Image: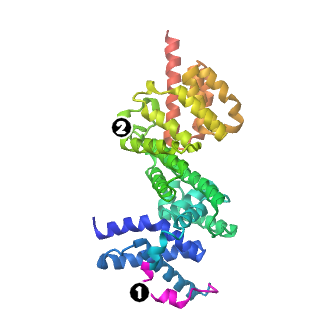
Amino acid sequence: MTDLAWIDIALTNARPQVLGALLRYFRNLDTAEEAFQEACLRALKAWPDKGPPRDPIAWLIFVGRNSGIDTVRKQAKLQSLPDEEAISDTEDAESDLAERLDGSGYRDDILRLLFICCHPDLPATQQIALALRIVSGLSVQQIARAFLVSDSAMEQRITRAKARVAAAGVPFETPGAVERSERLALVSAMIYLIYNEGYSAGGTHREAAAFADEAIRLGRLLLRIFPAEPETMALLALMLLQQSRKAARFDADGQIILLEEQDRSLWDRTSIDEALALLDKAIRHRRPGPYQVQAAIAALHSRAKRAADTDWAEIDLLYQMLERLTPSPVVTLNRAVALSKLKGPEAALALIAPLETQLGGYFYFHGVTGGLLAQLGRPQEARIAFDRAIALARSPAEATHIRHQLDRLSADAVAAAAK
């Protein structure tokens, strides 16, 4: 590995903790970002010749803090500064800082940074963009390509998000136990939003598909700072289980392959084994939550060697539990798929019929409805549902998949007429 390669890895891994500490110190996201960037530039100059410091994170925090203080002093934006001795005596300051990191609430620094990115005042798209820019360090250009917008439009979106966060006056004090739990739930939801953005893109949009890997990296970070949280374990397990099917989800032309038709030999068993171990550990805490239930559903799919071996009865029970934990029409829609395997398409259609008002603008609702109607031998109604699904598709792969369902209906109609 070249000098620049290992430095890049070190800076990427250090980014959340360093930026979180600088944010707590300066209480301004732009200042913290600029200070971190300056520290990275100095690392690129110093580390190849002098070698890595004893604690790269402490080094970056210390250098970034001093750089930020210099910048703020020049701009005359700070009314009070630390004592001069605290910022000029460099002999053992880095060592001091390294010793304090373990006990200084670094977990709250990172959690605060993540929480700012998923502030409830921000719409989901701005939460994702801000987290990818601030926490992950992706460039505006990379994020813009993934969202299929111009660089300037994405720059404006991130700038607006920062302005809304600043106007909201996010507190910087160490959160109490209740607030920490609330923040953790919000952060987990934001990470899963990032994952789903990448998962939905799949093999059809490489830039956006990379979000799934980044979400897993953030999930590992969250688990590292909250190693005893069962829902954090389950979130990572859920993402790993879904991502384990990556190689089997699309054919050579980038078209969607449904779960029951996938080549299960292509599933990543290493990721599955890691996820199952995490899920087992989470369940042993006896504190069930939505991510644990969703991961348990994904685990049942991963344990089935063939689609025919899937335990649909257990999956239906788990979806019923999920409906109680987090009532949602989307959860009920997913349960309908399991119910169709157990009691047939008519029972599933009856379950989701009342959801049309809530899910009328949801691609998957019309796709599932069309599939159930086709199974019931109601092709005209199925075509209407499939047409609505195509109109709501978020990617070419989704639209093409539904067109294939329409082609099957047409083929079936021709075959029936020929008899």
Q: Where is residue 282 in the image (x, y as percent from the top left)?
A: 51, 45
Within 10 Å of the Cα at label 1, are there few (<14), some (14-19), or many (20+) other Cα atoms?
few
* Element on which disc 2 rests: helix
Query: The disc labelled 2 sits on which kind of residue?
Result: Leu
State the extent of the magenta-drawn residues as a range: 78-95
Q: Does the magenta stretch include residue 382?
A: no
Q: Where is residue 155 in the image (x, y as percent from the top left)?
A: 56, 65
Q: Which residue is drawn at 52% across and 27% down?
A: 312
Residue topped by disc 1: 91
Residue topped by disc 2: 266
Q: Position of residue 163 (x, y in %)?
A: 65, 68
Vertical order, 211 against 168 (above or below): above
Q: Is residue 258 visible?
A: no
Query: The disc labelled 1 sits on which kind of residue?
Result: Glu
Vertical order, 272 against 64 (above or below): above
Residue reaching furthest to the top: 419
- 371 on left or right of 281: right
